[in-house]
Image (cartoon, grey):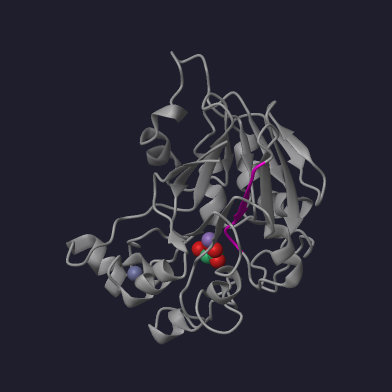
């Protein structure tokens, strides 16, 4: 299985249009080592011919153009028609609207996510006015084929984040995906949103080969301490990296070949290659995702 990180930043990208935090300034000026990152999405494939997208970011056009394997072949072959959604956040779903020129799209989403995208943000209702959309309900624990060589199972990721669009069921607001290559039996776990790494979630990560994990904030109080928001990382639905119960403490001991942070917010100091936080991660065997990173498992 091939995995391509299309976008490694959280909502807003790095740099973010309205931000002048140290990371955003460094990316713009080049004063410290840090590269620009687009919003959170990956693509997977068993053969580099047929691809599956996980989340559809607002940056999808440039993400596709920068990856020739996703380009259409003579205008006849479309490289992907399916998108698997982990949640209904805008950074993971606005890209659906940018795929409206296609002949149709298959969207894998839980009932709760589907409801939010239909009656809340309205993204799916708008998309359906432009092209046929086939909804594939995501049900926890069932195995679903992705082409002939891959399959996935989704697992529930409980969250207490405030709902911006009430009405949808609270269960199934966020899922993680385990994608397995049926030949090698090796798996990827994709988890860009997780509020708490509970024993149940950690069990889902056991024996995967690659883990792409929520790296939104370094500290729980990162946004309030910069005066950029009054919510903590956990209140926004994202476990912080540092501190007790943080992802570093819980994940660094796990025997997973590659543990890579994705969905990294522009305020996170790990975006600076020379920051002490980044060097600490390196020593703990955790990696920091970057756009265009490709893995084969
Ligand atoms: C999130 O991941 O918490 C959201 O994408 C934040 C947002 O609304 O941009
Ligand atoms: Mn997000
Ligand atoms: Zn910033």
Of residues 284 and 198, the one nearer the viewer is 284
Total number of numbered discs in the rendering = 0
Q: Is residue 99 left or right of residue 178?
A: left
Depicted 272 relative to depicted 113: above or below: below
Whether the magenta-drawn stretch holds residue 132 is answered as: no
- Residue 20 visible in the picture: no
Residue 65 is drawn in which quadrant? top left
User: Ligand 3, what quadrant?
Assistant: bottom left
Please provide percent x and percent y for residue 135.
Answer: 73, 38
Q: Is residue 124 left or right of residue 199?
A: left
Of residues 30 and 230, the one nearer the viewer is 30
Depicted 76 relative to depicted 279: above or below: above
Residue, x 52% and y 81% (percent of image)? 220
Q: Is residue 57 left or right of residue 203?
A: left
Q: Is residue 45 left or right of residue 70?
A: right
Residue, x 64% and y 50% (percent of image)? 122
Please provide percent x and percent y for residue 118.
Answer: 69, 49
Predominant secondary structure in magenta? strand
Please provide percent x and percent y for residue 110.
Answer: 75, 50
Of residues 214 and 204, the one nearer the viewer is 204
- Residue 7 visible in the picture: yes
Magenta extent? 186-193
Residue, x 78% and y 51% (percent of image)? 111
Position of the N terminus, as image quadrant, is: top right
Depicted 78 relative to depicted 133: above or below: above
Position of the C terminus, as image quadrant, is: top right
Please provide percent x and percent y for residue 131.
Answer: 61, 29
Whether the magenta-drawn stretch holds residue 191 is answered as: yes
């Amino acid at each position: 299985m091939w995995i391509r990180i299309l976008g490694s930043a959280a909502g807003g990208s790095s740099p973010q249009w309205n931000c002048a935090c140290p990371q955003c300034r460094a990316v713009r000026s080049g004063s410290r080592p840090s590269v620009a990152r687009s919003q959170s999405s990956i693509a997977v494939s068993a053969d580099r011919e047929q691809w599956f997208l996980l989340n559809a970011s607002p940056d999808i056009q440039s993400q596709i153009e920068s990856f020739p394997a996703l380009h259409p072949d003579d205008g006849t072959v479309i490289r992907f028609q399916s998108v698997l959604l982990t949640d209904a956040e805008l950074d993971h779903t606005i890209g659906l609207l940018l795929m409206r020129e296609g002949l149709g799209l298959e969207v894998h989403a839980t009932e709760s996510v589907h409801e939010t995208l239909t009656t809340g943000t309205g993204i799916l209702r708008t998309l359906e006015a432009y092209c046929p959309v086939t909804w594939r309900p995501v049900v926890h624990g069932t195995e679903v084929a992705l082409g002939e060589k891959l399959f996935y199972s989704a697992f529930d990721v409980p969250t207490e984040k405030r709902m911006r669009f009430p009405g949808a069921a609270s269960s199934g607001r966020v899922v993680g995906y385990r994608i397995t290559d049926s030949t090698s039996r090796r798996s990827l776990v994709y988890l860009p949103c997780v509020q708490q790494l509970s024993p149940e979630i950690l069990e889902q990560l056991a024996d995967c080969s690659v883990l792409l994990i929520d790296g939104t904030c370094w500290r729980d109080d990162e946004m309030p301490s910069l005066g950029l928001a009054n919510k903590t990382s956990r209140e926004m639905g994202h476990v912080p990296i540092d501190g007790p119960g943080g992802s570093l403490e819980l994940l660094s001991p796990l025997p997973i070949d590659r543990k890579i942070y994705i969905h990294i917010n522009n305020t996170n100091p790990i975006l600076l290659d020379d920051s002490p936080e980044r060097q600490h991660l390196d020593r703990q065997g955790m990696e920091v995702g970057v756009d265009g990173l490709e893995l084969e498992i």
